[in-house]
Image (tube, rainbow, N blue to C red):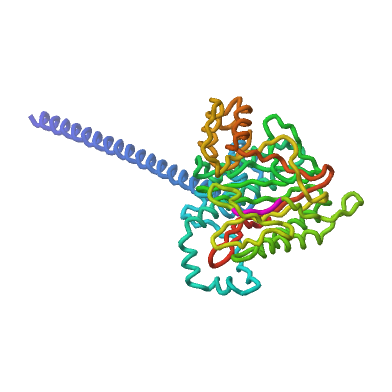
Amino acid sequence: MEESVEKMQISEEGVNHEENSEKVDAEEVTADVESKEESKNKRKKKKKANKKAADEADALAASEGAKDKEDGVEEGTGGDAEKKKKKKNKKKGANGQTDPPSIPIAKLFPDGNFPEGEIMHHPTVADDRTAKDRFTSEEKRALDRLHLDIYSDLRHAAEAHRQTRQHMQRWIKPGMTMIEICEELENTARRLIGENGLEAGLAFPTGCSLNHCAAHYTPNAGDTTVLQYDDVCKIDFGTHIRGRIIDCAFTLTFNDKYDKLKEAVQEATNTGIREAGIDVRLCDIGAAIQEVMESYEVELDGKTYQVKSIRNLNGHSIGPYRIHSGKTVPIVKGGETTRMEENEFYAIETFGSTGRGQVHDDMDCSHYMKNFDAQYVPLRLQSSKVLLNIINKNFSTLAFCKRWLDRAGATKYQMALKDLCDKGVVEPYPPLCDVKGCYTAQYEHTIMLRPSCKEIVSRGDDY
């Protein structure tokens, strides 16, 4: 009996010992699992921390690279991706414009405050009747404020003109065709002005008259003329916003021997601008221009020429959708005694020549303009009616050229165009040339005769 009890106790102890060993094993297993999970979590946290640090380092390196790029520092990385990025990014100037310019002026100045031109006082006329104290007069400043919308449109068009011409001065090189030059200029100007039918666009075709040709030459389709190193090229183009026209021109040369010719004409234009003002007689401006122009001489290939004012070319007043609105500003003495008036707009332009100083019609006509005062004329030819509709829709009373008719979709229009010219509906403006072998130059600015001051709205850093 006692032996059986002892056996039972021994067996119970064995069972208890087995259960305890199983518990210990289970606890050891759970401890192992927990330690594994902890180490796994630690590894995950470490990976996250390393990734975060790497991302921060990349971001810092990218920001430093962008800063270096802005400062003009170029570091060779050799990566194809970075080269592609560099090609895509266009350089931006101080005013936020790209190079070449592509952002419309309206987007660069979203508040509508476009840059003012150069401000000058009106000159005091001989009898002291007006122009005195206009700059400080509250009444005149109030009159200024009445026309702010017009001034804003002109400044908008002027800024588009300025940026376009400065791009072209850098871009044009000898060996380019005249068509290539005109298309680049016109496409750039259209982008910057934000072309929109008759609301905004180009005011007249791009003049790129060469050497003895002084004005009104633009290439027709198929013209293969190439710009040469020794050419004297007059770039004359216009922009407009709601018919408020900027008419501005400059002379482009590559050979330094023409510098005196350019200097004479530029100084004459600046003299005309300085002399212009409210109540100033137009003939007095012409006399001052001629005196300055003809005080210059230029030596070309060992021969000395006096620079002459081209007497039958002049500046002019500008009206809405009307490039020549009635008054002319002569560039020689003896013109009209008509006076300039308040709130008029003028293109002050001067032409200098080493030739006779007088131009005549020559070469194929490319410039045309609908007659501003034309009355209704019955047209028999259907093609003339179609062409007139295209002109009215695309240009109204602004000047145009044959290339622009092609662009507007007109076809086989030569006979129709001649018919409209014969009937006086459209006026042709053929190229104006001095004697062959001479050289002509031109500079031009648009001015506003504001009640309080005179603003040379198209003035820029270039001229």
Can residue 316 be found in the magenta stretch? yes
Magenta residues (range): 313-317
**Which quarter of the figure has residue 87?**
top right
Residue that lies at the very extreme toward the left in this rendered image: 1
Give the camera-side residue of 371 and 453: 371
- Give left or right: position of 27 versus 225: left
Can residue 293 be found in the magenta stretch? no
Image coordinates of residue 115 in percent, x first then y, are 55, 58
Image coordinates of residue 294 in percent, x first then y, are 80, 59
Image coordinates of residue 56 in percent, x first then y, are 49, 48
Residue at 86 percent of width and 54 percent of height? 305
Q: Quadrant of the C terminus?
A: bottom right
- Give left or right: position of 8 versus 370: left
Q: Can residue 64 be seen in this view?
A: no
Up the image or down, 66 lies above or below 429; here it is: below
Give the camera-side residue of 208 and 291: 291
Image coordinates of residue 96 in percent, x first then y, are 55, 51
Give the camera-side residue of 15 and 207: 207
Main SS, magenta region, reads strand
Residue at 63 percent of width and 28 percent of height? 414
Q: Is residue 113 visible?
A: yes
